[in-house]
Image (cartoon, rainbow, N blue to C red):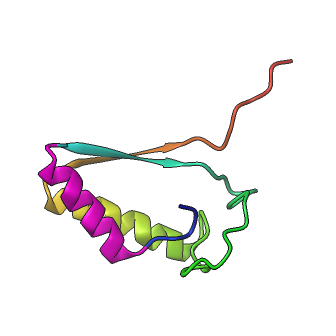
Amino acid sequence: MGSNLSKSGITKDLEALKNAGFSRTTMFSLADVTTPWAGDIGKSPTPEIKAWTEPWWQMVKHAAAESKRLGMDFGMFNVPGLVPEK
């Protein structure tokens, strides 16, 4: 999915989850502050949305607000990758 997201898309996804009986969601970030997105998303409709930037935070805030509106718990978990064993 990368940077291919919109507020209306987030709302539709959350409403579909709620209608399917889900009561909570968890957003997993697969990026970190040093690697906002490891892959190049060709022809992305929203190239300005990169992890940890203000446009990205606006999407996170929207997802949290929409979850609250729908009576769903919203959680976040950062998973930039595995730490190699020594």
Q: Is residue 34 above or below residue 44?
A: above
Look at the magenta stretch and give its main secondary structure.
helix
Q: Quadrant of residue 39?
A: bottom right
Left/right placement of residue 46 relative to residue 86 reads: left
Q: Residue at x 60, y 80 (%)?
A: 48
Give the percent coordinates (x, y) of residue 25: 31, 46
Q: Residue at x 69, y 57 (%)?
A: 33
Q: Residue at x 60, y 49 (%)?
A: 30
Q: Residue furthest top?
A: 86
Q: Quadrant of the C terminus?
A: top right
- Residue 67 can be seen in this image: no
Q: Residue at x 66, y 52 (%)?
A: 32
Q: Nearer the viewer, residue 57 or 45?
A: 45
Q: Is residue 75 above or below residue 62?
A: above
Left/right placement of residue 40 relative to residue 25 reads: right
Give the percent coordinates (x, y) of residue 63: 33, 63
Q: Residue furthest right?
A: 86
Q: Residue furthest front?
A: 43
Which residues make up the magenta segment? 6-21
Give the percent coordinates (x, y) of residue 59: 42, 69
Left/right placement of residue 85 relative to residue 64 reads: right
Q: Nearer the viewer, residue 35 or 39?
A: 39
